[in-house]
Image: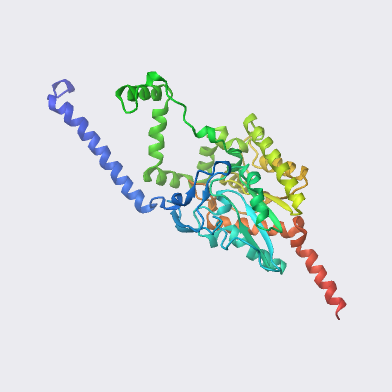
Amino acid sequence: MNMAQLPRRDWILLPLLGLFTIAVIAFSTELIAGRVLPDHVGSLPGCEVRNDNPFGARMTPNSVCWEKLGEGNLSEFRFNSCGDRAGMECGSKPLGTYRIVMVGTSVAVGRYLSRDKTFGALLPTGLSRETGRKIELYNKSMMQGYLDSVSLRFNELLAARPDMILWIVTPMDLRAPSYRPEALVQPALPAAAGQALSLQRAWYLLKNSSGSNSIQNILRIHFDRTRSALLLRHTLYESENLYLRTYLMGSDDEAGFLKSELSAAWKKRLEQFDSDTAQNAERARAAGVPLVVALVPSRAQAAMISASNWPAGYDPYNLDNQLRLIVISHGVSYVDILPEFRYIPNSDRHFFPVDGHPDDEGNAIIADLLMKELTGGAVPAFNVQTRVSLAGRLGELTK
């Protein structure tokens, strides 16, 4: 029997049967994916205060929230009376304690991890052990900040009474160098769009969506939110080669910082960083507080450096070199941990494959590398060699 001889009802039933089969497969896949990688859930967005526009999102003082990344574990986020995830109350530092005030964005906060697993919690313990000093780290990092949020909040950093300010920078921060509230305001629709909730408005929006390819984007965004998409990407991105190939196929906005020749957009971001660093350096000098800057790499950077191999036209060290030159030109210390990743096999496995934030092992590595560089001469107060030789001389004098 050919298609022309099918009964009319089959022309309806067969497509419906096909759609039903697709729906069953999709539903089953979602169930399986939900078992393997449980949903990204939590109450953390409820702790955010987003109406503080000049600084980015803040966290509600004295709040406790929970969050679980699909690739990670359920983690507690406890914020003190200043809205900081510092592991201590804000206020005066204990007598005889050297206080580091750290500032950065979600990587420095320790997103998706319990606080005790973050490098902000691990670093002061290691420094105290290596230097023999009582060192604490007060974390003033923002869950969703911007590059210039550090400059805008610098008075708050100084109010925390630091002996040193540690500014953690990531490639993600440079992608959003400035917060522009006007960008969040949607432009008004013309009169031709009709009244809200009317058929005329619906038809206007449909036509414009089709013309701008946003329908495809909307479908892609909705698929990206499914557990099936997360499981598929998580499985595929566990392969370093496949992850890198996919990542480098992304837009210049996302992967352009890895190129040996930066685009005009990335050069402009570096100009913004230069301006912010100059301002922060001047204010730190006026307050007599050392400012130290460190770049924490992205997963793609770590993968390239660890493998000692990357495609022509790319250089994972380029951004690091550019930042170092800018920082040093303003008389600020630069702690360079990036080259150390070449000694860590498969270092990209210490990042969440899809999300990209460093996991607990990645945070432990970052803490160790920061400790090594900070005690290697970047900060005189932490110079282990100086302290050891001084202790030796004092021992000789007391014999």
**Quarter-of-image position of residue 198:** top left
One can see residue 157 in this view: yes
Q: Quadrant of the N terminus?
A: top left
In the drawing, does residue 53 fall left or right of residue 72? Answer: right
Up the image or down, 95 lies above or below 344; here it is: below
Q: Position of residue 266 (x, y in %)?
A: 63, 34
In the drawing, does residue 130 fall left or right of residue 201? Answer: right
Q: Position of residue 209 (x, y in %)?
A: 40, 25
Q: Quadrant of the C terminus?
A: bottom right
Q: Position of residue 348 (x, y in %)?
A: 56, 49
* Front residue of 323 and 188: 188
- The structure residue drawn at horizontal position 34% and vertical position 27%, both measured from the top left corner, is 196
* Front residue of 70 and 200: 200
- The structure residue drawn at horizontal position 38% and vertical position 38%, both measured from the top left corner, is 223
Q: Position of residue 41 (x, y in %)?
A: 40, 51
- The structure residue drawn at horizontal position 37% and vertical position 25%, both measured from the top left corner, is 205
